[in-house]
Image (tube, grey):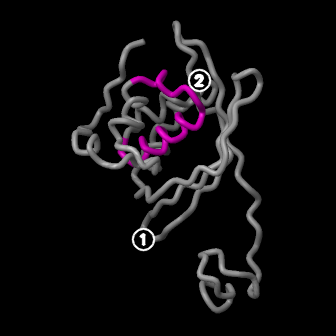
Amino acid sequence: MTEQQPSIDLSLARESACPCCSNTLYRDCCELVHLNHANADHPEKLMRSRYSAHALGLVDFVIETYHTSCEAEKHRDAIAQSVNSEWLGLEVIASSVEDEGNLGYVQFKAHYAENGNEYCLQEKSRFVTEQKGEDTVWYYLDGEYPQQQKVGRNDPCPCGSGKKHKKCCG
């Protein structure tokens, strides 16, 4: 498999903590997958590298790791816009591989800021494998989003302050 070179200068990122919050240097973590997509040997590894690609502005990598059925190239502008957010952190909640190793799930929370506001994207992503030459390669297929529950005025505030919602962010 040929190596993919990121389209931006990542020399400073190489010696920094990986954006995927793995407590590893970028050069020892997601850079390996950014240089060769087949290095993602588990759906969680691909999901972490996709998050890091968002944080580092690697639009081409994000597009190339979508499954072909998603036709991601048609959505390049929207994907590029999402990459332009300020990515603040990643929490992996759970990951699994099923269907004899051909189907994987990763549940996560990705924190980001946009236009001065902070958000949390929570998703259960679905990944599938395909044979690409001699390599079995993971691809992002789609994701499910949890049902948003309305926060009651007397419920604990979702910001984690410990205060009632009405006395905090409500």
Looking at the picture, how far across and down is residue 107, in whole percent? Answer: 66, 47
Residue 82 disc label: none
Name the residue at 74% across, 64% down.
148
Question: What are the residue bounds of the magenta stretch?
Answer: 36-57
The residue most toward the front is 23
SS category of the residue bearing label 2: helix
Q: Position of residue 160 (x, y in %)?
A: 61, 76
Residue 2: percent from left, percent from top: 38, 14
Above or below 85: residue 44: above
Residue at coordinates 57% horizontally, 61% vertically from top-left? 120
Near mark 1 (Cα within 10 A), the count class, few <14, some 14-19 or many ≥20, is few
- 65 in magenta: no
Kindly report the distance in space between the C-alpha atoms of the residues bearing marks 1 and 2.
34 Å
Look at mark 2 in the image and give the residue it sits on. Answer: 68
Question: Which callout, 1 or 2, points at the residue further toward the start of the chain?
Answer: 2
Q: Residue at x 69, y 36 (%)?
A: 96
- Closer to the camera in the image, 69 or 161: 161
Q: Identify the residue position indicated by label 1 in the image.
A: 116
Of residues 157 and 84, the one drawn nearer to the viewer in this rendering: 157
> Please, what is the three-letter code of the amino acid marked with disc 2?
Thr
Which quadrant of the figure has residue 47? top right
